[in-house]
Structures are given as structure tokens and as C-alpha cells.
Image: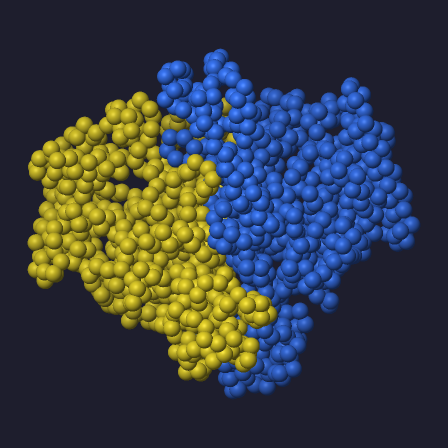
Chain colours: A blue, B yellow
Amino acid sequence: MLVIRQLFQLLTPVHGQLAHKLLYSMAEKTAGDLTGADPEIALAPYRTAVKQAGLRVQQAQMNAQTATGATKLDLQTEFTQCVSKLRAKQKELQEAELKMRPKQSHFDRSKLEQLLKRRFFYASSFPLYPSVAGLFDYGPMGCALKANLLSEWRRHFVLAEQMLEVDCTVLTPEPILRASGHVDKFTDYMVHDTVTGECFRADHLLEASLERVKADKKTTEGVKKRCDELLRQIDNLGKEELRDVIMEFNITSPSSGKPLSEPTEFNLMFPTSIGPSKQVSGYLRPETAQGIFVNFKRLLEFNGGKLPFAAAQIGQAFRNEISPGSGLLRVREFTLAEIEHFVDPTDKTHPKFLQIADTELSLFSGCSQMEGGSAQRVSIGEAVETGLVANQTLGYFMARIHLFLLKVGADSGRLRFRQHLNNEMAHYATDCWDAELLTSYGWIECVGCADRSCYDLNAHAIATKKIVSAKRPLPAPVFVESLDIIPNKQEIGKIFKSDSKVLLEHLNSLELCEMKQLEGALKNGPVTVTLKDLTFQLEASMVHFKSESKMVHHEEYTPGVIEPSFGIGRILYAILEHNFQGRKDDENRNWLSLPSCIAPCACSILPISSNEVFQNYIQQITSGLTDAGVTHKVDDSGGSIGRRYARTDEIAIPFGITIDFDTLKYDSVTMRERNSMKQVRIPLYQIPEVAAGLIAGRLNWAKVCEKYPMFTGQESSAAKDDDS
Amino acid sequence: MLVIRQLFQLLTPVHGQLAHKLLYSMAEKTAGDLTGADPEIALAPYRTAVKQAGLRVQQAQMNAQTATGATKLDLQTEFTQCVSKLRAKQKELQEAELKMRPKQSHFDRSKLEQLLKRRFFYASSFPLYPSVAGLFDYGPMGCALKANLLSEWRRHFVLAEQMLEVDCTVLTPEPILRASGHVDKFTDYMVHDTVTGECFRADHLLEASLERVKADKKTTEGVKKRCDELLRQIDNLGKEELRDVIMEFNITSPSSGKPLSEPTEFNLMFPTSIGPSKQVSGYLRPETAQGIFVNFKRLLEFNGGKLPFAAAQIGQAFRNEISPGSGLLRVREFTLAEIEHFVDPTDKTHPKFLQIADTELSLFSGCSQMEGGSAQRVSIGEAVETGLVANQTLGYFMARIHLFLLKVGADSGRLRFRQHLNNEMAHYATDCWDAELLTSYGWIECVGCADRSCYDLNAHAIATKKIVSAKRPLPAPVFVESLDIIPNKQEIGKIFKSDSKVLLEHLNSLELCEMKQLEGALKNGPVTVTLKDLTFQLEASMVHFKSESKMVHHEEYTPGVIEPSFGIGRILYAILEHNFQGRKDDENRNWLSLPSCIAPCACSILPISSNEVFQNYIQQITSGLTDAGVTHKVDDSGGSIGRRYARTDEIAIPFGITIDFDTLKYDSVTMRERNSMKQVRIPLYQIPEVAAGLIAGRLNWAKVCEKYPMFTGQESSAAKDDDS
């Protein structure tokens, strides 16, 4: 594997781009009926096909490496084609694997979407106006869910690791994003209608067109097969290949039928200009990371000059997608939470690695991907030890990401870490794993975790010609030689007059070795220097050399960076899918099983009827919960208590507090837990403490059930309760 | 006052713009030496001058109202000039008042700025690159402070009032901001160098130029006086007046000396375009409010159709300032926290008003501003009762804002609410009060609190031709008459042929009263209708009228909006100034007295020496505090404990936990409180609970001092402690 990694040289920048999306619908169409069969027998031919394709890639790679001249170019093209074919075979295998999974019987995406819209978790922005794709507003429930998710993130990462959180601007002047590579490389391929000018993302357009060709009854089996082959490679096609497909199928503009342009690169950043005279051109940041990199020096200083340390940032980022889609998965404005862990590149051990070494992760290694295998459960300790994961620090973060995702409600059976193959890895990354969550849209990249080596800090250092480094103590002090050149300005001026400036500038810019060379040469007589069409006859008397030697205790180095980067909207959508449930007795009664720590609202307060006598109690509980910092929602809308429980279950409220006629007698209320639907009876005054304890995790429901009496029905009145 | 309010018609839109900044330096230069004198005697002439100017405004206003024709224009100009003079006199009075205040003896802005930079609270963005004005990054301390401030805001407003929080996009298509008035009116005056093209904000440029003229030794006393007069009016000058001043003083470009252009309006929004073909032009939002307004219908539905309710939003907003400055006070990207409280405009009482009615606020009413008075302490109950504050809901929010600002550390002596005068009030606002905090830059608007009436929802309803309303039950059901017009298309077509379309469109667009008129007229014979140069002879047989009457139980209405809008960066800067302290024994030892609830970090952990034996204890405390959700910072850097306490005081850490040699013996540590510098000894295992209690406000320091023994020095070793 190592050999292949080093050899692969297709430098496709993929940092932060979309992962392999894989539509269930496509899987159904292409993978045939595999349910019921023994999984491994059914999958064997797919695995073999991947393995063979992988071997062909290796062979083509080696041929291309050893060839020279014109043959080399041909062999490189062949290699690229082999990689595309490998990808297609990998996709086929994945489709087959997905077919083998037990169906999420109750899951129906349209039902979830209806629920999310009806209860205003999120919806398209600017509802009164003509819609603009890829922009979403979070309503009260979505906004609270997102805020809780971020607050848990802060606790799990920033607080636990003493990270330095920063908050940088969205507006970013152009030079920063030029240095980072975004101005040149943050692009997608686009084609436009040569008559109307309408724009389309090339791969999406081809995908839709090929699907149409396939669906046409007149299409021959041979052409259908060719379409399938291309569809599986569509994510990996370059500019020329996209153009070839357009020509092969004579694809035209879907809206006008007119010819399409050649594919062109479209930069995905939103441009703007800063200041009144448009003197500073800039962009909305496409990621938050650059704000951290440019502040590295200040952060290092804040940390007392010590490494390693991590900085973190939560904030909005922007990508001008050509064709946004798939709900929250491909949008134009989104929230990122990013960590940049700065480390001495010669020592990537992590002091807390032992604490998580036994954590088992589902790892889908590059090797497995090449050989037709699947993701394997491996302890992160073993993965680092065997070299599968590049180092302890990268492994530590992968385990912490795994734990975080489970904590906020991801289903462990639908979570895996997929290693980037070298041809999809940004050229600066030495190892990169994506945490992917399986949704009805396929496996979705939700967190990227990359060892970016020293690329980012170096890029800014080169662009600004400033030193961006840290210091490490040397094992022993060393002597460092330095040489200064001191020009005799008077003499130079007398002889070279107005040309002196050019010579003086040249002398000041000499490197150590050049100075030494000059010093040696002048000992043998005058030296002729030619600069910008001017010739100078330099004599020994015109310059004086001063050499010095000093003891140095530290050496400077550029820190490496490990970057875990979280797409908050994607995580949010995936965990909504993972927590979308139906009740056993009624599959149509949908509810969300989100963990208490991120549920949009912690408690509902439900008077058993709209009787005026309950008003006082509602206010008492409300103000108690407010003081305890517990979010809550009063539902005094009438309707049966069972129907109201169902309404609160829909928005994932974990605890329901019901005020009934016994409350008037005993000053106690019932508390109902969403998942078990069990109820206990608790004294009114203890409610804030119990609720706060449950939400903060100081208490759990089992303990509450032990401490307080189970509730089955109130004495005081035979109130109707659909729920229990 | 009421009369004046109604009469004032200078519709300057000022919503969200900068308040009257007032430089201490200017006050010193112009107000003469007033310290030591009896304040009211010294201020009397200033008050009289304001009052006289106010009366002249009233007189001019009435003259202008009653005049007609050409005289009216002249009198309106005179009125405008009177208003400018009133403003100048008000400014003089304010300067004099500021001079009378006891000096904040220890306050030195440059020292605060140094501290904020050195400890990376915030600093200019993109430090490695050429700087761009008006962009700031928050470092670890500033970011934590801001996050805590926002979290307290959520608790104080969103949680306590069950507000519906939303999270809308920054990217905003143009039509929304055209409807809101921002595309046309969100502007500042700009002039540019006619040769180099360099741009300047007109009022700032004039201010600097006039100051230069004044400073010139050759300037006569008369001209200096004229400069002073203009400087006081500079905020209120219109396009023509700005041009006149440029000509009067022959002001040229400060960088090239070349002539300046006429002042032009510059829109302060950042433009961008959304999508690949630039088909959707948009802006970065200049405020978060519009996202709430366009979602009104969804929010009303979420709230079960019931009013009143409030929605809230925290987020970034953007203004392309022509010349940013004054640190965090005038920047190009900033965080807003806005509330839109929707209410039935016929009933602006507030159910919780009684709870805050006794809260005393410092109110600087419009009347006082006109009559040369000062801010007065008044209970909000009285203010609403007397009509000074327009209604209970507005008053309720003002009191809640007051309480919030004090909670997060504002000094009550440097907080006032200033009422907008009608000529500075946006034309849709019926009453507006700014919470202003006094800083070394003068009184700064930090929170706007406006009754915006139904303006915003109406604006979007008009722009989109959609109904944006709520329903209220009628006292009794009423019958509503409706009339439908049904054209006889066959007959019309036969007679008017291709012109029929124009006639049919016209008939369909008729209002109820027009239909009735037409119905009546047709009874008397044919009616002639002229449309777009076409004449139609309409006969009774060509149209049929159908009238209906139905019972209606509800009426629709457009809700009013009360809007409290918080500039988070400004509040943050002001409370940093208010909490910048020096120790009694050492004025140079600066520290920040920020309240625990918003301090960037809750606890420091300080081993008394770098001895290895303390490492275990550090880890034990760190993990306990992490589990309890308490932020903390380990300082094991060596240096005397006193010097390290001073370092943590600088970044406002309220509690310091010191591990010493007694810890090894007794498993206890000391806890030191920042303000009192007192220390107690607490068992190690109780630290997380005590610290969490102190930060959440469940415990206070006095109680901790009662419960635990006071600490004066450790037994086990005579550790040096500079601090106690």
C-alpha cells in the first residue's frame, strides 16, 4: 500500500469537497436483487472485480513511472483511465453492500421532510420571495438543535482539550485565499447554454442526461451499459473527459436544446469588494481554517510559545455551488466547526492517546478500497500501531470524533471512517480520514480529519515572506556561523555614481554562500558583477566582511497541522435521519429520539386541561426552569394529553411535565420520559433540579425511576390519557 | 412635546446608525474649565442656550407648516438650520456635562488597548497581510467573552420569554433589501479625489480639515469660532451643506491636495451575486431583522397562530463603512443580537410589566434634550404611565435591557436611555430609545429599542403582494358583503375581438366600490370605458354581477413590532472599559472586574511551583472541572504566585485554584477570589461543585467564605506569595 501511496500523483484537490454520494435509488436500479442471499457469496464477484481493477492501477502506475518521452504521456493517460475504472468498480461494490443492509423499515424520507418542515426545523430562506437554491433558515427547533450541538462540541473538544477558540471575519481579502490555493483551485466544472447563457454543473448535467438516455425505450442494451459505466465514473471525470461525453451523446442544454459550451472551471467563492473605492477585492471565506493559520503567531504567543496546542473556530462559510441540492447536504451557506492542532512534525505522539486507544472504530482503509474489502472494526490503538492510521495525534482525534458523533445521536452502525486514496487527497495531506454517516442519500462525509503536514503555514510564509515558525530546544547547543557584508558606500558612490543603488541592493541581498564566494574571489583581485545591463568592477576595498559565530540553543521549524473539520448542517441532518422513529404500536406515529443533551427543548409543560386553576402552577414551573437554565415549552392548547405528548415527541422533547388535579392536592406533577414513555410523580419544588440534572447528565432516567414513585393514573379525576 | 413630535417631518433614516460620538479630547478643547464649580450654576447658561434654540425650532416649525408657496420652501430651510443649531447647542451642553463628571482617575485607554492586544482579546484581522480597516479577529479571551455574553443574552431574553430563535442566512437576495428600504436609503455621504479617485467619508474628512484649520496659528478667532460651530453640526449636514462647507474652506484631498468631488451617496451594503451565471444579485445582510420578518408566517404558525410572541436572532451583519475606526465601535463585520416582538397594535400592554415596573432607569427624554435638561432617574412604571415611554411593551424591554446590561458588567452610572427626536427617528418608528454606554469615546449607542409599528411586515407585503397578517377574534361576528363581476366572454369577444383582453383585465382588477359604481351605471344604459387609447362601449348584457354576504368571526391585521437590537461588539468594548481597574496599592497593576457569568475563563489552576508532584493534582482538577463544564486555564509557567495571580486578574479570571505542599498532606487546595483577593481552603473533591456553583450563580463568594476556612498561608512550606 505504501508504495502505491507514494507513487500516486493525480493531485486532485479534494479538501472539504463532497464525498461519494450514492443514491439509494441508483443502488436499486443497478445492483440487482441481492436481499436474502448470503452476503459474502453475493458480494464475492464485486470484491474480485475491485481487486483486479486495483491491480491494473498498480501495474499502469508502474509502467507510467518507468516510461520516458511520448510513451510516458500515453501511459499516464492509461493510468488515469484505470483509476476511473477502479472507482466504478468500487461504486458497484458499495451499491451491492448497501442492498445487503437490513432495510430501515420505518424510514421514509418524505415523512421526515414533512415533519422537519411542519415543525419548522429548517426551510428555504426568504419564503415570501422567489426562491434561491441552497439557502436555508433554521426555525426555532432547528436553531436550538444546532446551538445545542455546537455547545456540546465546545464542551467535547474546546473545553476538554483546552483549545484556543477564535472568531475571525467572514470577509477575507484576496491575497490570503490566493496563498491558500483557493483562488486558483477551488473550482467545479461548469458548462453553459451557448445561446441563453444558462449555467449547469457539468457532472450533474451529464448524470441527468445519461439517466434520460437509459430510460429511453429505444436505447440499446449496449448503450445502456455504456451509460452505467460512465455514471459510475462521473465524479472523477476531468475537463477533457467531460467534453468527450458531451460529444459522444450529443448532449444539449436541457432547457433550450441549444449547444453547450466546453466545460470551464468555475470558482466556488463569493467575491465582493471591501471599502468604498473597490480598492480591496475579497471573498466570503470558503472555510474557517485560514483565519486560524494567519493568527498562528499570536496564538503561539498566547500559549506561552509552547507546542502542541489546538485552535478552534465555529462560524459561517460560503460556497457558491453551481447547483445546490439534497437539502442541507449541498448548500451555499453553512456552519463549520474546525480545529487546527499544531504539532512538532517530528513528534506526533499524543499524551492522552492511551485514554482512547481501546476505542473501536469502523475503518474503511485505502487498502480495503483498492482490494474490494469493506470497513473493519479496529481499535484505534491497533490502527496506529500497524501504521494504518499515520500517527497518534491523528488517531486520537479520530477516536474523539467517533465518540462525539455517538454522543450527539449518530447510530454507530451507520458511521465509518473512510481513508482518502492518494489520488483524492489534497497534495499537502499525508493521511486523511473522513467520518461518514450513512443516510438515505448514501454515505455522507460529515467530518474530515486530515494530517495536512506543514502546508498551510508554509503557504502563508511564502506568500508574505514572513517567518511563521515555532522553536524547539536543540539536544545540545550548536555554533552557527554568520557573515555580514559591509559596503564602503563612500567609495562605491564616488565611482559608480547614480548606479550605486543597484549594486548596494545586490550586495545586501546576498545569501551566506554567495558572500563566501565573493569574499574568496576578491582575494584574487577585482570581480566583475553584471546587474540589469550594468557592469561593475568590484574591488576588495569596496566591501568589508565581518564573520561571527554564535551559540544557538533552539532551532526554528514550521509546525505540522492535524485538522478535524466538521460540517455542522450535515451532521445535523444525518442524526435527524438516524433518530427518526415510529412507535411500535403505530409506525405512523413518528418521533425523534435525539439525545437529551442536544434536544431542541428539554421539557414540555402540559396542564391536563385548560382549567384556569393550572395557570399558577405553569408560571411556577416556568420560572423555576428558567432560573435553572432549562429550556421548556408550554403546551396549554387543549387536545388530549396523548396527542400533546405525540406533538412533543415529534420535536424530540425528552421530558414532559404534566400538571393534573392531583397537583392541586399534593403539590406534585408527573414527569414522562420520551423513549420509554414511562412516568414518575415528583414534588413540584424538585422539578427544576431533577430536570437540570437530567439534561446536564448528572442524573439519568433509571435513577429518577428508582427515587420517585411510578405514575399510572391520577386519583383526583379520571383524566383521559391516550398515552399510557 | 407631543405637538413637536407630530410636526417634525425631517425623515432622516437613522435606524441602527451610529449615535452621537463625543470625544473626550474635543470636550477638553471646547468646554473650558468647569471642574470644581457647582455643576448646576456652571451648566445653567448651556441649558438656557439649548432651551432657546429649542423654542426657535418650534417657532420655525410652525411658520413652515402654515406657510404656502415659495415662502414655504424658505421657511423649511430656516427650520432645518434651526434644528442644526439646536443640535450644536445640545452638543455643547453634553460636553460641559462630561467635563463635570468625576474623572475615572485610573482610566487610560492606551493601557486598556495594550492589555487587550497583549492578551489577544481581539486584534486586526489577517496580521501577516496588508491591513484592511474595520475587520477584527477575536482571540481566545475575546471569543470566550463574546460566547459567554451571548449565552447570557440567550438566557436573559430567549429562555426567559420563550422567544422563538431563528438562524437565517447572511446572503440576502436584492428584492428583500429593496423592500426593506436598504437598497435606496442605507447610505453615507462620500467625496472622492477627482484625480486619484481616493474616497473619503464626507463628514469625517470635513471634521479633520476643520480641526486642522483651528490648529493653525494663523487662523483668526472668528474663523475658529465658525469651525467650532460647524464641527458641532457635522453629523447633521445634508449633501448641499457638506458641499457648501467644502467650498467655504476650499477643502481639498488630504493625500494629493487635488480638488474633491461633490458629495455623493454611497450604499453601505456589500454586494455579491449568487449562483454561477450572476443571475441573482444580493447583499450581505446589514442587519439580522429582515430574516425574521420574511419568516413571520412560519413563526406565527409555529406559535399556534397566537400573538404576541417574540422571535430572536444572533448573527453576523456587514456594513461597508467608508472609513471604519474607533476600534470595535465602527467596524465592517459585527455580531448583532436582535429581537422582534410581534404584537397587536391596538394592545401593547405586557403581561409581565408589573414585575419590572419599579425598575429605575436613567431616561434622557426628547423633551429634556430640547429644553437643555439632563437624563433623569425614573421608574419605568411612571415613565409609561405619564406617556414618556410610548407603551408597556416598549417599557418592558427597556427595563429588561437595563437589567441585562448591569448583569453583564455595565456601570449603572454610565448607562442611560436616550430618546430619539423625531427628526432622527426612522419614519416608521413611533418611539425609539437607545441604551447608551459612556466610554472614553463618549456616549455610545449599544442597544436600540424601537417601536417600529407595522412598517416592516407591510413593506414585505407590498413588495410581494402577499398577505402578511395575523387574525384577531371580533367582539361579535359581522356580515361582510362581497361582489363578483362575471364578464360574458363570448359576447365581449365577438364585439371587441383582439382588444377584448385589455377590457377583461380591467374588469378583473376592479375594487368593490368600482364594481358597485359600474353596476349602478349600467342600469342607466351603456357605459364608455377608455383604456390605453382604446374605447369600449360596455353594455349591461356583457357583464353579470353576483353579490354575496358571509359571516366573519375574525379580522385580519398587520402586527406591530417592538425591536430591541444589540450591537454585541460595542457592548463588549464598553463593559471592558467599565471593568478596567487598578489595584488600590498599585494603580499600574491593571485588572478586569468582569462578572463571573461572562468572564472568558472561570478558574485558573496554579501549582505553587513547577515540582513534578503537582502534575497528578493538576490533571485531577482539570478533568473534574471539564466534567462539571467549568472553563479553566492551567498556568504552570513558574514565576511567583503573586505575579501569576496578576496575570490571571488581567484576563478577568474570577477564581484561582492553587495547589501547594499542603495539598499533598490534606488533599485540599486554596481558592482565591479576584475582586477581594481573599482565599479559602477547600477539599480537592469539592472543587468542581463549588466552582460550577459560583459560575452558575447557585453559590456566591460570601457563602463560600462562611463555609470554608479562610486561608492565610500554608503550613508545609514557606512558599513565597506576593499576593496576600
Left or right of residue A213: residue B474: left
Residue sitting at x 9%, y 50%: B49
Left or right of residue B474: residue B430: left
Residue A387 in view in this figure: yes
Residue A3 sits above or below residue A416 on the image = above
Q: Quadrant where the N terminus of chain A lies?
A: top right
Residue B438 sits above or below residue B29 on the image = below
Residue sitting at x 65%, y 61%: A352
Q: Nearer the viewer, residue B668 or B501?
A: B668
Residue A122 sits above or below residue A485 on the image = below
In the rendering, at what x and y percent does residue A644 appear?
A: 58, 68
In the rendering, at what x and y percent does residue A462 appear?
A: 54, 34
Q: Quadrant where the C terminus of chain A lies?
A: bottom right
In the rendering, at what x and y percent does residue A273 appear?
A: 44, 34
Q: Residue B222's image quarter?
A: top left
Find the residue positioned furthest to the front: A524
In the rendering, at what x and y percent does residue B417 appear?
A: 27, 58
Q: Nearer the viewer, residue A722 or A402?
A: A402
Residue sitting at x 72%, y 33%: A10
Left or right of residue B373: residue A177: right
Q: Nearer the viewer, residue B525 or B450?
A: B450
Residue sitting at x 79%, y 29%: A65
